Every structure is written in structure tokens, then in C-alpha cells.
Amino acid sequence: MAGGITDTGEPYSPFVGLVYMFNLIVGTGALTMPRAFATAGWVVSLALICFLAFMSYMTTTFVIEAMAAANAQLRWKRREQEETDYSDSTSEYSDDGMDPSRSEPETKPILSVQRSGHADHFDIVERVEMGQMASMFFNKVGVNMFYICIIVYLYGDLAIYAAAVPISLMEVACGNHSCSAGSVKFNDTDTCWGPVSRGNAYRVFLSIFTLLLGPFTFFNAQKTKYLQILTSLMRWIAFTMMIVLALVRIGKGRGEGRPPVANLYGVPNLFGVCVYSFMCQHSLPSLVTPISEKRRVGALVLADYTLILAFYVLLSFTAIFCFDSSLLHDMYTLNFTDNCDVLDVPALRYFLGLFPVFTISTNFPIIAVTLRNNWKTLFHRDGGTYPWVVDRVVFPLITLVPPVVVAFCTHNLESLVGITGSYAGTGIQYVVPAFLVLHARRHGAGGGAGARHQHLLQPSGVWFSSGPPPGPCSCLPIILTDRVTCGVRPEPPAYECLKMIK
């Protein structure tokens, strides 16, 4: 997420890209959604989640368009540099007293020769992270605001993960998977083992979690392909199991849920949970760039969001009609681990109880390293380097300590997810993509004759073409507008051809 162009990664098919995006979006937020649905009411929840799914899809297309514009601008700048180098070389060639009519040196840029070709200058082939796009299209204030927003969001993400794992371990260790617990919600003051309360047991597991995974913040961590496959498989099994078990219980007429139709009191928290649960915009560059065939990436994203929306609605509706709303846990998996009427197989109850531990623990070091790198990028100055103590100790500590402190103070996952999604999540998912695409269109991106923009959302009243401008205008347009504007300016042209439809 820090600025700078990174490796594209191994290419994969559009179908694999769809699976990766599904796995990225469907995570911890989905486990907190059933309780948020039960609080806000099923009609309000259904309407709000459909609206937010559509808005998240739109901002996802905004980010993809900004990525295409950033790729085109990088090509334009590279071509300008090549032509500058070529001009310098020919100037030196003439200064040597050689006959200008003789053949020129074999250093002419290939892009210059092929300028009249039909290469797709807006093709997404370089991975340009959101931080780099912010640096390209925003001013200094905008760049700093972006990094502050992403840092606050990542802090909330780490706090959610730091609380979710100890909660699951506490539920398993306190012996609430033994059928004797039943459908009961325990308090932190209740006994876990001996004189140790459940609240203190939670803090013990949080300390162990911090000691085991915290050191990864001081180094570089990278998720391996096989670990990603394993966690994805566990996620599919766990969510499918919860949906099927709830449907079976409802089908037998044993559903206890009587959710309200509407309760506006629960809407703010539901909003935050939904925003958090649809979050993927900050990781789109690493997801979309390796896709081998990008012509249908828009349809791919639409299919993914439709599938995820249906999945969330199915998971949440089966939950709120299967369980009493007052007994729904912040983390939905716990409703299956302490209720033998729903699941009477001990091994499966332990699997669901420990499911967040395995999946979330693998993500915590990666997000921590990402947050650390964003801190470094925010304070970095060109040509400057950090002292060893600042680089290796200070930045990791300011990354790790705040979310752990928050997790020590509260383990209310519904509130943590709601706050993270409502504030920083709204900025990352809605505000930043909208401003990115707006400034990308205004700022312009390199294209030249023959450029196409397959990822562009076409505004009303504007016509785009990959051929030369029709009519008397024979120059490149200089700004995206509802009127024909021709001319050449020092900055790269925005798009190749515009024509008034009216």
C-alpha cells in the first residue's frame, strides 16, 4: 500500500481473480454482520446492504479506471524521457560534424516509431498501488490525508484481529463447547478456570497472541501460496457449514429468531459493518494487475459483488431467523460452538471455534507490515534515510502498540468493526476512489494517437474513439469535458478523442 511500483506477480486467469477477490472481501466483517442485521431489522438491513454493495462496486470501478490512467501516464512519461534521450543523442550526432542527411543512429525509441499504432496505452500492466496513485494525482495535502486515512483504517483492522483471536481462544479454553453451556451469553466476570475470570483469560490470550505474532512487525512477512489456499479452503468450509446448519434448523421449525422489521437505532453500526465487509479497494492493484485477460474485468467485478451480496444476505438471514437476536454473538461462529442443539459433533464445534484463530492469525503480520510501511512512506523525504533505531524499532512499535492497547480495553467486535468501517473505511472505500478518478481525468494521462481506454466509465455527452478526431480538429484533446477541446499543452493529454454528442 505504500507508494511505489511493485512487482506485478504471476499472472492468473479471470476466474482465479474472481476467487481471490471473493476471499479478500469475505472475512471477519461477515462474522459480525448477523448481529448487526438483527439489531437494525431485516428490511432496513436488506435495503442498506444492497445500496452499499452497489456503491462499493462503483468505487471499485473508479479505482480500476484510475489504475489505467496511472499506467498510461507512466508510459507517457517514459516515452517523453526516451524521446528526450533520443533528441540529445541526435544533437550530439550533428555536433560531431556529420552530414544530417546520413542515416540516424540506431537509438530511436520504439514507442516513437510506433506512435501511430494501436497499442493500448491504458492497459493495466504495472501494479500502481493507491499510495502511488495518490502521489501522482493529489497535491501534498491530499497525499497526506490519504495516508492518514489508510493508517487509521489499518489500525482499526489490527485492533479487530487482535481482539477476535483471543475471544475465540477464550471460548474454547473456558470449556463452553461441552453442551452444558447451552444458549447462554457469558459475562467477563464469570469464571473461566479456577479463580481466573473470563475477562482475565481473554487478556492472557491477547498477551500470548501479541508475543507470538508481534515480532513479525519488526521484519517482513509474506503470505505463501499454500497458506493462502489452506485459509481459503477453511473459510469456504466454515461459512458453508454455518449456512447449512442454520437452514436445517429453520427447516425443522426450530428457529428462534424473531428479528424486527426496522430499527433505525442499529443503522449507524450496520453501515460501518457493511462498509468494512465490502472493503477491497485498497488491495485492488495487487488483485487486478496479474489478471491475464482484462477486457472483461468490469463484468468480473460485477459478478463478484453480486455473488458476495447474495452470500452475505444468505448468511445473515439464516442467522437472524435461526437464533434469538438477544443471543447472537459479536462473532457468529460462537453461536455454533456453545449450542449443541445446532451442532452436536464436538470436533466440528472446535473447528468453528478455532476457525478465526487460523485465518486471522495469518493476516495479522501482513497487515502490520503494511501499516509499518505506510508510516515510513508518510514521513519519508526524497534522498533521506531513517536511522536504524527509527526504522527497526520506532516504526514497528508505533504500529503494534496502539491496536493491542485498544484490544486490551475492549473486545466488542461489533463496535470495533462499526467504527472502523464508518470512519476510515468510508474514506478508503468511497472518498479516495472518487477523488482519484476525478483527478485522474482532470490531470490527464498519456495516450497519444491510437490510444484506447477500455476501463473508462463514459460520462454522459462524451464520445470516445480509438481513431483520429472527426471533423476539422486534428490535434490531441487536452481536457475531459462535454465540449470539443483541441490543442497541445505541456502536460500529457487526458484522452485521445472527444466529441460532443449533442
Image (tube, grey):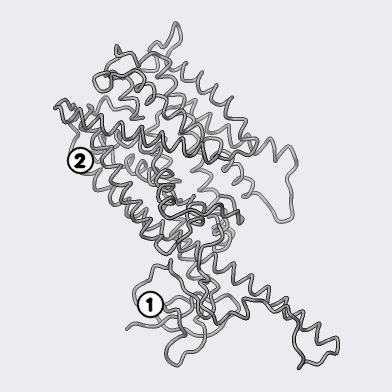
The answer to whether any part of residue 309 appears in the image is yes
Amino acid marked by disc 1: Val
Residue 357 place in picture, x, y as percent: 46, 28
Residue drawn 34% across and 44% down? 274
Q: Is residue 28 above or below residue 449?
A: above
Lower sequence index among marks 1 and 2: 2
- Of helix, strand and loop, which one carries label 1? strand
Query: Mark 1 sits on what residue?
Result: 462
Q: Which mark is residue 262?
A: 2
Residue 18 place in picture, x, y as percent: 40, 51
Amino acid marked by disc 2: Ala
Residue 193 place in picture, x, y as percent: 43, 9
User: Looking at the image, which residue sits at the far top?
Assistant: 194
| Disc 1 packing (10 Å; few <14; some 14–19; many ≥20) | some
Image position of 53 (left or right of 134): left
**Do labels 1 and 2 touch, CB within 8 Å?**
no
The answer to whether any part of residue 427 appears in the image is no
Q: Is residue 408 above or below residue 107?
A: above
Q: Quadrant of the image for the C terminus? A: bottom left
